[in-house]
Image (cartoon, rainbow, N blue to C red):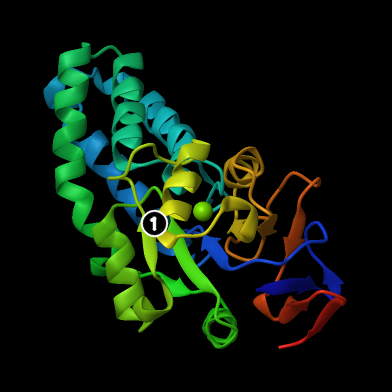
């Protein structure tokens, strides 16, 4: 059992401490923004290239570009940290693409078919196979080693697919730090609190004995609703400032977190 200190202050209610940490992936474990930006740009490019053949009038291509960029959360050269590209699973992004195509006049079957085609053309840009493979966030490896040394289990809770989670962890030699994963293939998905309960069950740890760390309000509110003991926002994963719910504690660098052994009388250094 450990306690987590943020900038020297103990997190969470007084109690026996925590036994596991659940990490979001994109924007928390990984700097995913350059890869996600390249993916969103490629989807826009392919939509504009193929939409005329599917019936989009040429004079509406400018509107289509604007709708897609808004739908994907593309702004200021980056990606909106809470937009669909950053937060949502592939199938939700595909539906938002089809919706933009429908808004410029395509029928729904044609919109869905073109979206499927565009995603098939651009899927290779997602994940570790991309030209901008996501890197671990600064100081992550050191934190994971401190958690391991203190006997704390770790899990990944993400709306990426299991393949994407494994590729990221294995590429950076991090796989052995994580005992369980909850992915887009699992049901229910984030942000249903049932996703937290499922991952906790896989880890064999009660939600109140866990910390959950994420970079989206949807992650943080899910953790609270699931009864997680410590819910912590991570703000250093994106180029845009994160507007996280201030009712949650927030960390700007992993070195701000200390892992200390929980004791009946309080805490002592692990
Ligand atoms: Mg995230």
Q: Which residue is mark 1?
A: 202
Q: Nearer the viewer, residue 2 or 90?
A: 2
At 71% from the left edge and 67% from the top edge, which residue is drawn?
17
Q: Is 105 situated left or right of 8 in this image?
A: left
Q: Is 265 or 120 nearer to us in this picture?
A: 265
Q: Position of residue 202 (x, y in %)?
A: 39, 56
Left or right of 20 in this view: 117: left
Residue 4's place in the image compared with 180, above or below, is below
Quarter of the image that includes the C terminus: bottom right
Q: Nearer the viewer, residue 186 or 209?
A: 209
* Mark 1 CB within 8 Å of ligand 1: no
Instruction: Report which quarter residue 96 is drawn in.
Output: top left
Q: Is residue 142 above or below residue 62?
A: below
Q: Position of residue 256 (x, y in %)?
A: 75, 77
Instruction: Choose between 101 and 264: the one closer to the eye.
Output: 264
The residue sitting at 73% across, 72% down in the picture is 3
Which quadrant does the N terminus fall into? bottom right
Q: Is 113 positioned to the left or the right of 127 in the image? A: left
Residue, far front: 264
Residue at 45% over, 64% down: 155
Image quadrant assignment for residue 238: bottom right
List x then y, in percent, for residue 83.
51, 40
Q: Position of residue 212 (x, y in %)?
A: 60, 57
Total marks placed: 1
What secondary structure is found at the residue carrying circle 1? Answer: helix
Q: Is residue 32 visible?
A: no
Report whether residue 110 is seen. Answer: yes
* 194 relative position to 55: left or right: right
In which image quadrant can residue 169 be found?
A: bottom left
């Amino acid at each position: 059992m450990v306690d987590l200190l943020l900038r020297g202050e103990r997190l969470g209610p007084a109690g026996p401490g925590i036994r596991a940490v659940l990490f979001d992936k994109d924007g928390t474990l990984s700097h995913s923004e350059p890869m996600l930006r390249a993916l969103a740009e490629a989807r826009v490019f392919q939509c504009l290239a193929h939409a005329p053949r599917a019936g989009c009038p040429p004079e509406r291509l400018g509107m289509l570009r604007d709708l897609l960029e808004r739908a994907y959360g593309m702004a200021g050269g980056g990606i909106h940290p809470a937009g669909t590209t950053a937060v949502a699973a592939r199938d939700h992004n595909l539906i938002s693409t089809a919706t933009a195509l429908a808004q410029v006049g395509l029928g729904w079957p044609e919109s869905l078919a073109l979206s499927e085609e565009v995603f098939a053309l651009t899927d290779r840009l997602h994940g570790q196979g991309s030209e901008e493979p996501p890197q671990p966030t600064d100081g992550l490896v050191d934190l994971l080693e401190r958690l391991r040394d203190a006997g704390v289990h770790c899990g990944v809770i993400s709306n990426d697919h299991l393949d994407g989670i494994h590729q990221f962890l294995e590429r950076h030699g991090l796989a052995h730090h994580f005992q369980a994963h909850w992915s887009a293939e699992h049901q229910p998905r984030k942000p249903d609190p049932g996703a937290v309960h499922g991952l906790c069950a896989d880890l064999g740890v009660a939600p109140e004995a866990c910390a959950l760390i994420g970079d989206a309000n949807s992650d943080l509110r899910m953790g609270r609703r699931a009864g997680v003991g410590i819910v912590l926002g991570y703000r250093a994963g994106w180029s845009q400032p994160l507007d996280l719910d201030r009712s949650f504690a927030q960390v700007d660098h992993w070195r701000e977190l200390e892992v200390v052994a929980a004791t009946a009388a309080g805490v002592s250094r692990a």
